Image (cartoon, helix red, strand yellow):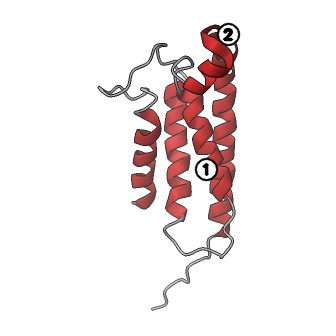
Amino acid sequence: MAAAASAAAAAVVVGVPTAVIPNAFFGREIPVQWWNYPALALTALLSGLVLGTYLRPSPPVAPGGRLGSVGGVLSFFAVGCPVCNKIVLLLLGTGGALSYWAPLQPLLALGSLALLAEAALRRLNAQAACPTPTA
């Protein structure tokens, strides 16, 4: 339940401001690309798994925290509108955002998913096994 709720929250946190999930608060100058939807879905799924592991007791030094954070931030930049990102516009301008940033976004999405998957694997491997109840 916690992982499902975390996945839904992650989908809203990433999908609403990037306007991959249509809403009245945010818009896009460039239409949503086909790959934004599976990238958002996989980001939500993996983020839910990572966030769900924080609700159980874990070892004092639980691995994967930074990887998950970086992966989540990268996914936000990956599915966002290339010309709506003020940082990219300041660094590259509109032409650069469309010519250079937009083609890199699918690779950024793959990188963010790889980081989230690695964080989930590390967090899940660090979980202690629960004892089996005996009758």
Residue at 32% over, 27% down: 23
101 shown above or below 42 = above
- Residue 76 in the image, given as x and y percentages of width and height: 55, 35
Q: Earlier in the sequence, mark 1 or mark 2?
A: 1
Q: Looking at this view, name the residue that lies furthest to the left.
A: 24
Q: Looking at this view, name the residue that lies furthest to the front.
A: 90
On screen, residue 17 versus residue 79, left or right, reads left
Quadrant hosting residue 53: bottom right
- Residue 90 in the image, given as x and y percentages of width and height: 62, 20
On screen, residue 42 versus residue 24, left or right, reads right
Residue type, label 2: Ser
Quarter of the C terminus within the rendering: bottom left
Q: Residues within 10 Å of mark 1 (few under 14, many from 20)?
A: some
Q: Which residue is mark 2?
A: 99
- Residue 103 in the image, given as x and y percentages of width and height: 67, 17
1 and 2 marks in contact (CB < 8 Å) = no
Q: Secondary structure at mark 1?
A: helix
108 shown above or below 5 = above
Q: Looking at this view, name the residue that lies furthest to the top.
A: 95
Q: Looking at this view, name the residue that lies furthest to the bottom.
A: 135
Residue at 60% over, 11% down: 94
Residue at 60% over, 74% down: 58
Which is nearer the eye, 90 or 127? 90
> What label sits on residue 69 in the rendered view?
1
Quarter of the N terminus within the rendering: bottom left
